[in-house]
Amino acid sequence: AQKVTQAQTEISVVEKEDVTLDCVYETRDTTYYLFWYKQPPSGELVFLIRRNSFDEQNEISGRYSWNFQKSTSSFNFTITASQVVDSAVYFCALSEANTGNQFYFGTGTSLTVIP
Amino acid sequence: DTGVSQDPRHKITKRGQNVTFRCDPISEHNRLYWYRQTLGQGPEFLTYFQNEAQLEKSRLLSDRFSAERPKGSFSTLEIQRTEQGDSAMYLCASSPTSGSRGTQYFGPGTRLLVL
């Protein structure tokens, strides 16, 4: 079973629009960690944020914000006032305390921001 | 401050040949990971080292795959008798020890094409 689901395969928005990328995870651990990474066309995965299961506070960093809701097992990512440079594939990932150090990645959401 | 580096960036080989990839982690990081990413998918965990010890191996890591980290610094991933199904992006990541689920920082990847 997929531990991380990113249902949106591709999204296109016009520059300056807001966009939300969905991430739903599945785990039986009470201690776990959630991540978002950005993968631009160059291929390198760029770390964006890390959240542990005990911290449900939402976070804002510039135009980026994250909404973590344990009740719905979701960790959604919103980009406000999107820019062309935001075009990339975005991955959500899960790390569980009891299953070692590996990350479980979703299949990614490809975001295209149209100028 | 240099990030994770990987060499080569691209490799084209014929089926049946052996290939070796190198990863140099961030210097103060003692954890090192290998992942494989195929087109349209998220990275999949292959193996993990803490210092020179290989602590975890995925079922994806068949007998044809071997990874080493001889002095706890750089790591190599070798694929013997390559098959067309081995064509993928091979990603290396490193993380510090502090924090049980440290953020993983990724290199640019090695893209392998097996003809």
Image: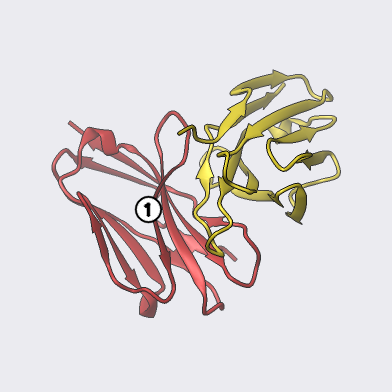
Q: Residue at x 50, y 62 (%)?
A: A4
Task: State how the image is colored.
Answer: by chain
Q: Quadrant of residue B67?
A: top right
Q: Position of residue A91 (x, y in %)?
A: 44, 50
- The residue nearer to you, when weighing B17 against B56, is B56
> For chain B, what colour was chosen?
yellow
Q: Quadrant of residue B83?
A: top right
Instruction: Give the SS element for disc 1.
Output: loop
> For chain A, what colour was chosen?
red
Q: Position of residue B38 (x, y in %)?
A: 59, 39
Give the residue at mark 1. A8
Determine whether, in the image, residue A6 is placed left or right of residue A83.
right
Q: Residue at x 82, y 26 (%)?
A: B18
Q: Position of residue B107 (x, y in %)?
A: 54, 36
Mark 1 closeness class: few <14, some 14–19, many ≥20 residues within 10 Å: some
> In the rendered image, which quarter contains the C terminus of chain A?
top left
- The residue nearer to you, when weighing A49 against B24, is B24
Q: Residue at x 68, y 19 (%)?
A: B12
> In the rendered image, which quarter contains the N terminus of chain A?
bottom right
What amino acid is labelled 1 in the image? Gln
Determine whether, in the image, residue A26 is placed left or right of residue B72.
left
- The residue nearer to you, when weighing B74 against B111, is B74
Q: Chain of mark 1?
A: A
Q: Quadrant of residue A34?
A: bottom left
